Amino acid sequence: MKSTRSMFLMASLLAAVGGTFGTIFADDGCCNNNNSCCTTNNCNCCDCCLACCQDCDDDCNSCCTTGTSNACRDVCGGCATSKDMLLPFSQGDNKARWYAGVAHLQNLADQEDWNWHLDFALEYNQNFKRGLLGTYFFPNNTNRITVGEDTSVSGSADVRGTDLGLSETFNGYLTICPKIQNVVFEPRLYVGLDRWVEGLWFDVALPIAYTRWTLQACEVTTSSGGVVFDPTAGTAGGTLSLQSTYTIAQNSMKNNGSTVTAGTDPIANTAAGRGVVTPVGANSICRAFSGQATWGDKQTGLAAGRILCNCENNKTGVADIPLELGYNFINRDRGYLGAYIRTVFPTGRINNLQSMFNPTVGYNRYQLGGGLQAKARLWERDDETSVNFFLDGYVTHIFSQSQCRVFDIKGRGAWSRYLLMKEADSSGNYTGRLFNFVDKFTACVKSQFPWQADVLAFLNVQHKGWTWDIGYEFKGRACEKFDCECITLCQQCGDSDSLKCDDDDDCCTNNGNPIGNFQYGVKGPQFIGQVGNVVRDAADTTINKFGVQTDPNGATVTGSTLANSTLINASNFVSYLDLETTRIPQAIANKVWSHLGYTWADRDYPVAAGLGFEVDFGASNRQPRVWGIWGKLTVAYN
């Protein structure tokens, strides 16, 4: 009867905790295209329009472990922006869940035989403050981007729509409130090896995780624009202003099909130089970024860096396997002090959708390090009531892995990865094809994280069979570092379970060159020209603002200068990659947690059960802020 009452109380507590957290941290469900909030400028919707803080530290450090030292800002307390990849702390890195309800069943004093406990934990967690997380990806310190005409012509768009196949007169905005949900089932085995050496122990877990990621994007179109790119407006010939050039260039997307003598400069303000009318590639921001949009001379969709607006993407896998082997130098009934070696075996997975928001399970990287653990009994009334303090901390090194990653162009601003480019042959002449930078210059880079740290501190109260844990957990991870001597162009990844570059996972020995002798220059305000015309690089163009570098013109463009004749190719592309905007920044999270459990100790194999919750406050926007609830069942032998 007593056992039944205890189990009923725990079930009631789980329902109460779930209801409380659902009320406190629930989002209002407004991030969908059918909600009225998405058709108004309501900044309370899913934390929409949430302005991000600025970086607090402008000091520079190296992005590289080897090779040329590239200075990167040390984002220590402010917000990261324009990132292509989010890496939450692994679902398997949860010391609070490990210790919850079982601290009194391990590291036992005066043992001469085996002792062990086998745990089964089931946790559900999801992130809150989702608008803040959205600022991690966008280039303007908010979770909303405006897409429209080049700002040199009109407006204040963050992204020029024509580079992604939208009409020159299109205008709209996209707000994201990324949602991450995890279900983790974690069997864990602790074994005291006191039969061999008193105080020796090992601990291993198998965190099986199901994760579901959704951008929950709200798109609002204020002007759908035209259905074609029409570069024929106005009279060809004569002098052009820069403003006129910008407007025509945004519509100059398809060559007229004729080939000119190789190596000749295009005569921009002619019918042949302007090109012909062609349908737009998209009529919405979501489609433009989806990888499905093609138009004019842009014959293939976006190959990477995609934004998959409202698709629920999921992944199931083992979130790496942590193993600890330790020894307690001091092991008394009132406390202990010990050290351990921690290694993590890579079993993680990623649902590689060539998008900027890919569901991730674990890290899929080796880790090796060590830690310390301690216990002190603070107060005791009798054998059945006590208050104890526990401390556990470790540091590991996260080893390198070669991955296919997306990069911006150095010195050309955030999201320059999406700049539209003209393709040239080995002689620098137009082939009749357009690509975005990300289509051709996704790069294989070997990266590592110098350290990851975890510190857990909590109070444990025991009264008869009841145990109550309440505590704090700190997590930290260093900025990502690249091996700058090992950067090559990626073959398109065929493995949907990872970002690995190839079967050997080593870009340094990957000698493939997927672009061959082709070369590329940013189109910017240049006209399309004809096949065979010289291609130039509009190096002063950003993703929302044209520069003054245009084509050479028989009819002068007032105020223009000649675009750059040096093109981006397989031999020089590394010098164009912006490592800072790609690397994953330093991450910090602070967690509070609690667990209430009961142990039926009067059995041959004691049984413990309990319920717990956690709230994880990721610092800034670089880690999701998460709440979670769990239940735990343990069988022990001692």
Image (spheres, helix red, strand yellow):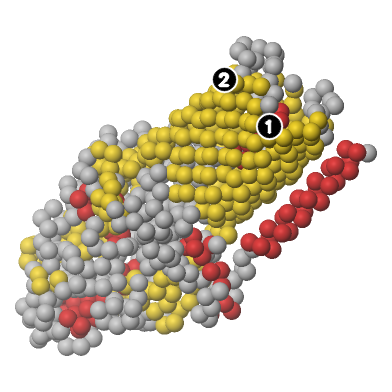
Residue at 35% x, 72% y is 158
Which image quarter is the C terminus in? top right
The disc, 2 or 1, on the residue closer to the chain's N-terminal end is 2
Residue at 33% x, 52% y is 74
Q: Residues within 10 Å of mark 1 (few under 14, many from 20)?
A: some
Is the residue under label 1 in contact with that under label 2 (CB below 8 Å)?
no
Residue 398, percent from left and from top: 42, 36
Q: Label 2, on which residue?
A: 329
- Of the pair 32 and 370, the residue shown nearer to us: 370
Front of the two marks 2 and 1: 1
Residue 369 visible in the current orientation: yes
Q: With respect to residue 195, does 533 lie above or below?
A: below
- Of the pair 261 and 572, the residue shown nearer to us: 572
Which image quarter is the N terminus in? top right
**What number of labels is visible?**
2
Label annotation for residue 377: 1
Q: Residues within 10 Å of mark 2 (few under 14, many from 20)?
A: few
Label annotation for residue 489: none
